[in-house]
Amino acid sequence: MPEHTVSQETNRARIAGYLDHLEKQRKLSPHTVTNYQRDLLDLALMVEALPGSLAMAAVGHFHIRKFASQLHAKGLNPRSIARKLSAWRGFFEWLADQETLAANPVDGVKAPKRSKPLPKALSADDAVRVVAEGTPGKDAQAPGQLCNRAMFELLYSSGLRVSELTSLDLRFTKEGDYQSAGWIDFAEAEVNVTGKGNKQRKVPVGGPAMEALRAWLAVRDTLVRLDPRPLFLSDRGVRITPRILQFRLKAHAQALGIPANVHPHVLRHSFASHVLQSSGDLRAVQEMLGHASIAATQVYTSLDFQRLAQVYDAAHPRAKKKADSGA
């Protein structure tokens, strides 16, 4: 039998030896060893499906690339393929200590890139409902409700990150080591924020959001306790936290019957999608969102085919079939 061929039993014995090494030498848990066993069994089956009786030591880079492609074609997700490649790489590293290998055939083989899910955004109607309507059964003029309205309006109006919003101060303050990370410029109707990478930017604030902010400021002092700097306060009179904001927004949307998991980033996505759909100005949206790369903003250019078809039918002069074509 040629050196590069071997019986299936020998290949399975190699795998069994590696699994025994994982269990007794590396002391991995039975559950982890079982996962390795499953991934290595897949490798063995694909090697056995090749012409001839190829030995594990003869498996090359080309074979591993082919196996990864086969897994992808079967619909296995990139994360699972990456896990299998990792298990196979460890096996061949161990095998190199048992017999001569030209190289680890898994080195350099990468799983397919994971597709990035599109950001979830509300419809324009639902977004407006979330930020404009009061919570059913609550007093719309209560300080907590006025605070919520101002926060929700500002999230959607200016596309802020939740951390950017909760770090806002009533006005710019610099005292000792403290300096405001963000504040509202009421004269210019702008919000100044410090985003990722400690980069500062200014974003316009819409009229409804400015009105909501002024309504909140009219009662804000009734909640102030020790620190007068924060713009948004909890019921205890301290700076609102991202967690409390997330909880309030989710509960508010549920009370309105919005059929989605609404969290602050959903309003940021909605802001970006709606502004981009209306203006088509990708660079402007990039600046307002504070994205360092235009690629991060380009995801919002993706529209589903149904919407594209509707736009085409409504706008293109040759889209609609004529009732009487004369045929």
Image (spheres, rainbow, N blue to C red):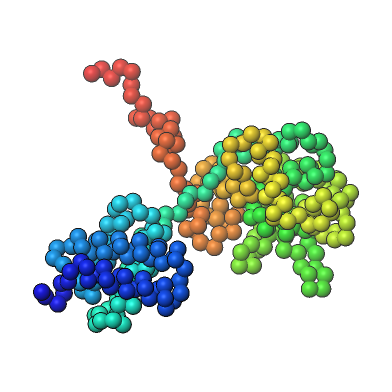
Q: Residue 259 lies in what quarter of the image?
A: top right
Q: Residue at x 30, y 62 (%)?
A: 41
Tell me the quarter of the image containing the C terminus.
Answer: top left
Residue 87 appears in the picture as rendered: yes
In the picture, measured across the screen, residue 170 lies left or right of residue 125, that is right
Tell me the quarter of the image containing the N terminus.
Answer: bottom left
Instruction: Please name whichever residue, 288 or 79, is drawn nearer the observer in this view of the structure.
Output: 79
Image label count = 0
Q: Residue 130 lies in what quarter of the image?
A: top right
- Where does residue 295 sit, x and y in percent of width and height? 47, 58
In the picture, measured across the screen, residue 285 lies left or right of residue 105, that is right
Instruction: Please name whichever residue, 206 or 46, is drawn nearer the observer in this view of the structure.
Output: 46
In the picture, measured across the screen, residue 115 lies left or right of residue 195, that is left
Give the residue furthest to the left.
1
Q: Residue at x 30, y 61 (%)?
A: 42
Look at the picture and state if 151 lies above or below 327.
Answer: below
Residue 275 appears in the picture as rendered: no
Q: Residue at x 63, y 47 (%)?
A: 263
- Where does residue 193 sit, x and y in percent of width and height? 68, 59
Q: Residue at x 51, y 54 (%)?
A: 297
- Where does residue 134 sit, x and y in percent of width and height? 74, 36
Look at the picture and state if 23 lies above or below 144.
Answer: below
Q: Residue 25 lies in what quarter of the image?
A: bottom left
